[in-house]
Image: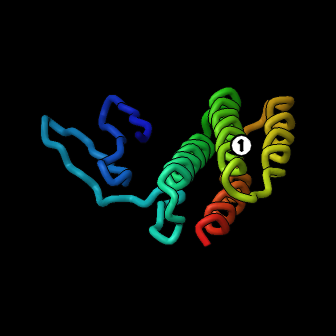
Amino acid sequence: MGITHKASMGCIGRNPRGLQKTCRSFSGIRIKKEDQMAFVDWEESFSGGNGAIDTQHRRLIDLLNNLYETAAAGKDHAAQLDALQELVDYLEIHLRFESSILDVDSSIVDMGKDVLADFAAGTGILSTEEVDGLKDWVVGHIQDVAR
């Protein structure tokens, strides 16, 4: 489910629990580093009891982690724009679904589209601090629905 990136001297991938593993190969010997936490890890307190919504919320966290990884790695504007577009598009789909069965505030979609339009019009790159602001809303939304 996570992104896999292979470099000439190693690999970065996700284990079945979604935790990042980094390994390096030296003369055929693979050395695994400790599990590293993602930007946002799924917590059982995020579960609201609706499997479909919980699955979508996990996907939102995956997309947010992907966006953070592009910012932390200093990827170019186009790569960050793709990651932000994917998050905003999925957020719109998710909130449309969620509002069909729950009373939720979907105004975040308009905010997300504004952020996306502003970012698309520029040439800069996102900082991890800016992604952290998006995290606050996504996690807050998930916690509100889980209550």
Between 135 and 146, the one nearer to me in the picture: 146
Res 96 quadrant in image: top right
* Whole-percent x, y for residue 14 in the image: 35, 45
* Whole-percent x, y for residue 39 in the image: 53, 57
Between 96 and 37, the one nearer to me in the picture: 96
Which residue is located at x 56 percent, y 52 percent?
53
Coloring scheme of the render? rainbow
- Total label count? 1
Res 142 quadrant in image: bottom right
Q: Amino acid at mark 1?
A: Arg
Among all residues in the image, which is located at the extreme left? 28
* Whole-percent x, y for residue 140 in the image: 68, 65
Position of 21 compared to 38: left or right?
Answer: left
Circle 1 — which element? helix
Res 36 quadrant in image: bottom left
Rate crowding at label 1 as few (under 14), some (14 to 19) or many (20 or more) other CA atoms within 10 Å: some
Position of 26 compared to 35: left or right?
Answer: left
Which residue is located at x 66 percent, y 57 percent?
138
Task: Give the residue pinned by disc 1.
Answer: 96
